[in-house]
Image (tube, rainbow, N blue to C red):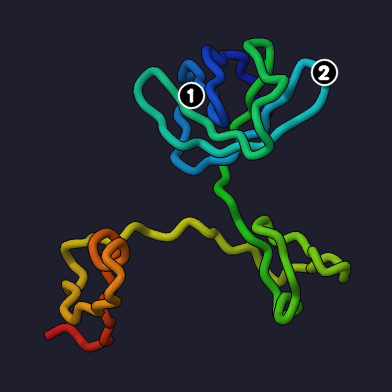
Amino acid sequence: MTKEYKTIVEVSGPLIFLEKTEPVGYGELVQINLPDGTTKRGQVLDTSADMVVVQVFEGTVGLNEESGVVFSGETIKLPVSKDMLGRILSGAGEPLDGGPRIIPDKRVDINGASMNPYSRMPPEDFIQTGISTIDGTNTLVSLWIRSPT
């Protein structure tokens, strides 16, 4: 049985802040039920001992302390299939090209593991563009794949 929590303490831009009510995970999907009966979706961005921060995907207009939040226990999973090849899809995997819905072969978690920057090979070959804003703030390097020794 799912529980709906009405513990929203603040709405700020695309974020809502809730008093913590149960153990929730980073990236967990939520459903937000508005007082007018509509629903919105969001994702947990941060959790601490007493607060949960949720990013609302569809905007926060209409959200208030009376809105309820249901935690799904799931992270974002993208339905995938070979039928996706050559198609134009939204960021949520929905067809934008007028073709039929994708019938997935499986659902793949899109949250990748973070990389330890210390474990990667340091960049070596600087590419100088001659454009100072690129060279100074967005340094480009050539990447050579080589096996670690």
Q: CA distance from mark 1 to mark 2?
A: 25 Å
Say which quarter of the image contains residue 122: bottom left
Q: How many marks?
A: 2
Q: Nearer the viewer, residue 53 or 137?
A: 137
Residue 87 pos. (x, y %) = 75, 75
Where is residue 61 drawn, in percent x and y?
A: 69, 24
Q: Quadrant of the C terminus?
A: bottom left
In the picture of the structure, the residue carrying the numbered disc 2 is 36
The reply, left or right, for residue 69 in relation to residue 37 is: left
Q: Which residue is mark 1?
A: 22
Determine which quarter of the picture holds residue 59. Answer: top right
Query: The residue under label 2 is which amino acid type?
Result: Asp
| Identity of the residue drawn at 21% across and 70% down | 120
Q: Nearer the viewer, residue 7 or 93?
A: 93
- The amino acid marked with disc number 1 is Glu
Which residue is pictured at 27% across the width and 75% down the height?
130
Q: Residues within 10 Å of mark 2 (few under 14, many from 20)?
A: few
